[in-house]
Amino acid sequence: MQVLVIGRGGREHAIVWKLKQSPKVTKLYCAPGNAGIAAQAECVPINEHSFDELVAFAKEKHIDLVVVGPEDPLFAGAADAFEAEDIAVFGPRKDAAIIEGSKAFTKDLMKKYNIPTAAYETFDNFEEALAYVRKQGAPIVIKADGLAAGKGVTVAATLEEAEDALRTIMLDKAFGEAGDKVVVEEFLQGQEMSILSFVDGTTVKPMPAAQDHKQIFDNDEGPNTGGMGTYSPVPHIPQSVYDEAIRTIVKPTAEAMVKEGRPFRGVLFAGLMITPAGPKTIEFNCRFGDPETQVVLSRLESDLSELFLATVEGRLNEVEPKWSDESAVCVVLAAGGYPGPYNKGDVIEGLDLASESVVFHAGTAHDKEGRIVTNGGRLLGVTATGATIDEARRKAYADVDRIRYEGKQYRTDIGKKAL
Ligand code: AMP
Ligand code: GLY
């Protein structure tokens, strides 16, 4: 089987790394990929959004399966573009990717089908939104409706912060059209947990839970990022709560999408808050998480290409993914200054010394001399497995210490909540 993976982050590196282990995969391409992916797949310099070029490439190379990593191309219709040419593609169509693309759509869906989530109201008028926020009081959560690269959400501790967020989104249009509508949401308290599931329409095959660390600094301080590290499993959240989340949230959502005439095929990512009243949905994503994928796929014992094909062909009910009992920890190494402005082109050294983990690349590139250099905000996901979270942490951080570059930035507390 010849496979084309679309994307350039740590998530796509983990997908490529896992597919590379499959005896069924004879050739792997990645568009556009990164310096780490280049060691395992042939990288082709086509942008994630150049659908015509991607489809032409897939036809020319007789690609048997396309895997779309990021949400933006999915929301723009990447899966539809390949399907239109009869090319098998893993990832939801545009009309199902909306589950991530529009928070207002998803909140309404959850209300209609009684899927647990925070109470909310949607507004397209600033004055009405402001009046509602003042009536509700703080803490309160303000979200831009559309895609805002994870930056459209404000968890406001005070009324002032909430009003500022409304102004930034609705009047200053900081996120463009994504801010035409806002969702104002009840503040939920509890532990967060991510559950990713393979979904082929009606059949749901959940993956083990993972926990992300969104803030840039230790102890969950500082601004939000794309994710600074993950671990799996999440031992302090009981199996019964995980089972309840699958029963009350993930499966009903897949069924709801079928009933709405928008069957979801791909990875459905449920971001959950475990509240005293049980698990509630914070968000859905229409793709693998980054860096959740790095830890979850590190624990997958089954052939990923078979799971992808079973999803695409609507026969997930015939397969049972096997997961290792080991724990996995991923520590993200970021560029100095991230999530604000950062440097590019700094040489990364010591990658060859990392011996206790798998180092997934994200924002890396080769320079003219063939050295690996920084080329983004999140650079590497140092991912180790072990009998316990503690052991996996020790191995990951040992390799983190071996990697050097200017402005190296990472959290020292990934996985600590599980200890
Ligand atoms: P989102 O982009 O929707 O995942 O939100 C980003 C982060 O904001 C989440 O990971 C949570 O930490 C936080 N958040 C979102 N919604 C709520 C809520 N209703 N209550 C508390 N925290 C929230
Ligand atoms: N790590 C969070 C996400 O992928 O959305």
Image (cartoon, rainbow, N blue to C red):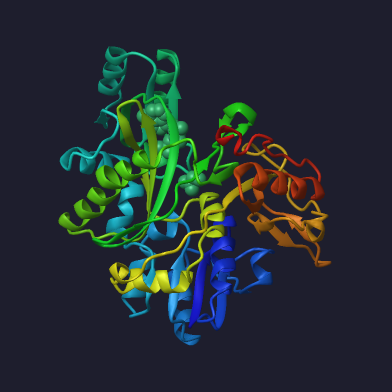
In the picture, residue 51 is in which quadrant? bottom left
> x, y percentage for residue 409?
72, 39
> x, y percentage for residue 176?
42, 40
Q: Quadrant of ligand 1?
A: top left
In the picture, residue 163 is in which quadrant? top left
Query: Is residue 340 left or right of 24 when viewed as pictured?
Result: right
Q: Quadrant of the C terminus?
A: top right
> x, y percentage for residue 186?
32, 24
Query: Is residue 414 left or right of 129 when viewed as pictured?
Result: right
Q: Residue at x 21, y 54 (%)?
A: 255
Q: Residue at x 41, y 69 (%)?
A: 307
Residue closer to the observer: 203 or 364: 203
Residue 175 seen by the camera: no
Residue closer to the observer: 398 or 4: 398
> x, y percentage for residue 381?
64, 51
Query: Is residue 311 left or right of 254 when viewed as pictured?
Result: right
Does 121 appear above or below 63? Answer: above
Q: Residue at x 28, y 44 (%)?
A: 249
Q: Residue at x 31, y 74 (%)?
A: 313
Residue closer to the observer: 377 or 397: 397
Residue closer to the observer: 252 or 35: 252
